[in-house]
Amino acid sequence: MLSERCAGILLHPTSLDGQGLGDLGPQAYAFADFLHRSRLGLWQVLPLSPPGMGDSPYSAISAFAGNPLLISLERLADRGWIGHDQIRCNLPQHGRINFQEVKAFKLPLMRQAALNFLSGSGNGDGHHRFADFKRENSWWLEDYVLYLIIRRVHQRALWNTWPRDLARRLPEALHNFAAEHAQDLEVERAIQFAFFEQWRALRKYCAQRGVRMVGDVAIFVNHDSADVWRNPELFHLDANLEPTIVAGVPPDLFSATGQRWGNPLYRWDVLARENYDWWVRRMSWILKFCDFVRLDHFRGFESYWEIPASEPTAINGHWVPGPKDDLFRVLRERLGDLPFIAEDLGVITPEVNALRDRLGVPGMKVLQFGFGDPGAHIYLPHNFGPNCVVYSGTHDNDTTLGWWQSGASAEEKRHAAEYFGHPPDGINWAMIRAAFSSVARMSLVPVQDVLSLGSEARMNIPSRPDGNWGWRLEPGMLTNELADKLAALATVCDRVPQVPTAGEQSMGHEEFAA
């Protein structure tokens, strides 16, 4: 349960300006400074895993690895991994991300930087920390790098179509492959080391400024992932290692055929017999790097929509009970307090609400949703309890200004005008004020709403398979005047962060990228 009033901004690091896309380099530190000046104590990001299909952070090839594209080449150059002259490029510093161009430029340089590091270049005592990193994280790292290199050798083919001995992880085949590709595997280990060192350094910098990180975990994992390849017994797969049933959501007012996501579903009975060890490892891992964790599709823990894999849509599915309290009982026993946020949006049943309330986990309130019929008023501040997280909108919604200009119905606009009046700085700032001044202990707003941007700045359209996740800040958008405006609001709404503790100030070891 949340215990203090706090507020912050939702901004994924790729949306910062930088070489082709945002990363964990200087602009991330500048954003932390902006939050500090704004007297805001939270920075929410999307999943940080390496994306798979559609470049979506929610479609990852590993639940544990970090996204190499987020590594700052500038910081690697500062530490001697690569020359500053080698990382200059003509990729735009702002504008929408072209992920293919960024990968073509950045990934070869990342591998060269890792090779340089492995040969002894730069970084002082980093080699000792690299040895520690490999030893401490071998439980996920070895499977991930093997999966990545086997996948690369086989032209990104789905793992269950690899040669049988590799697909089924026969020890001799894996040993022989590892021996043949030892250098490539070591390079990928070094790249992961670089990612987590840079993330730890950024988080430490934020903590020293009173800023805590809000992470994000997708409930399901991809079939095309190191996780399913390593643990096929935890998923509903057939003799050919293909999913037999897959995840999604049923038809609703927004989609006559529902959404067929295609992720393989968990064998919760097997997970329960293993005391949910995989989930314990997963949540323990992210809690090392974030202060709070948003659980995407929380309702799937109470019951989930099961679709036969042969079905082309989500129509012919049915609800199946999830692990409910049992999973969270084990997580709490093994990990202690659970600083989770339940993504409980959409069609939510009383049973889902009851599970969330029994756990004491705050749910989400999205102000954009509050102005339809009276049933939507649960998203308006006068109906909030303190233990919730209020948003103006999320990464899946249009920006608030975009919603107002083209998405809201005439009735919704009329109701919103009655609720907020006609603020001179726009409906987005009316919602920000309502969020900050509400009784909800946590308030988070997308940076696009702070900047009064329209639909051109939307991050994601869920029904669109391509072209998402590419929006970025323009240089100079985050001004001191804007920070001071937020600071004044945070102050009067009692959301200024507490002074960081000595423990927060000294978080972690001395990272090479600090």
Image (cartoon, helix red, strand yellow):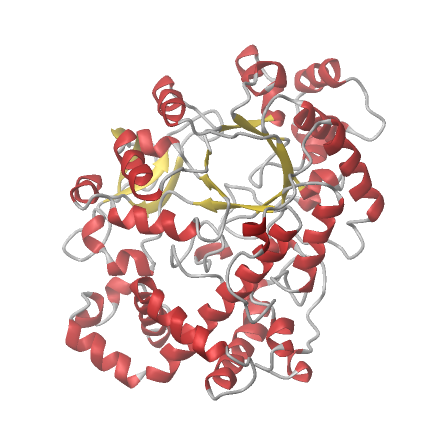
Residue at 15% across, 43% down: 273
User: Looking at this rendering, what residue extends furthest in the bottom direction?
Assistant: 119
Q: Is residue 202 above or below residue 218?
A: below
Residue 220 placement, left or right of 341 = left
Question: How far from the left and from the top, in percent, is residue 221?
Answer: 35, 50
Residue at 20% across, 56% down: 241
| Quadrant where the image shows the C terminus | bottom right
Q: Quadrant of residue 452?
A: top right
Residue 347 placement, left or right of 123 = left
Residue at 33% across, 70% down: 135
Question: How far from the left and from the top, in percent, is residue 280?
Answer: 31, 47
Q: Quadrant of residue 131?
A: bottom left
Q: Is residue 261 above or below residue 385?
A: below
Q: Is residue 435 above or below residue 167?
A: above
Question: How far from the left and from the top, in percent, is residue 292?
Answer: 49, 42
Q: Quadrant of residue 140?
A: bottom left
Q: Is residue 60 visible?
A: yes
Q: Nearer the viewer, residue 180 or 154?
A: 180
Residue at 57% across, 13% down: 373
Q: Nearer the viewer, residue 502 or 27?
A: 502
Question: How far from the left and from the top, in percent, is residue 489?
Answer: 76, 31
Residue 90 placement, left or right of 242 = right
Q: Is residue 469 visible?
A: no
Q: Is residue 219 above or below residue 319?
A: below
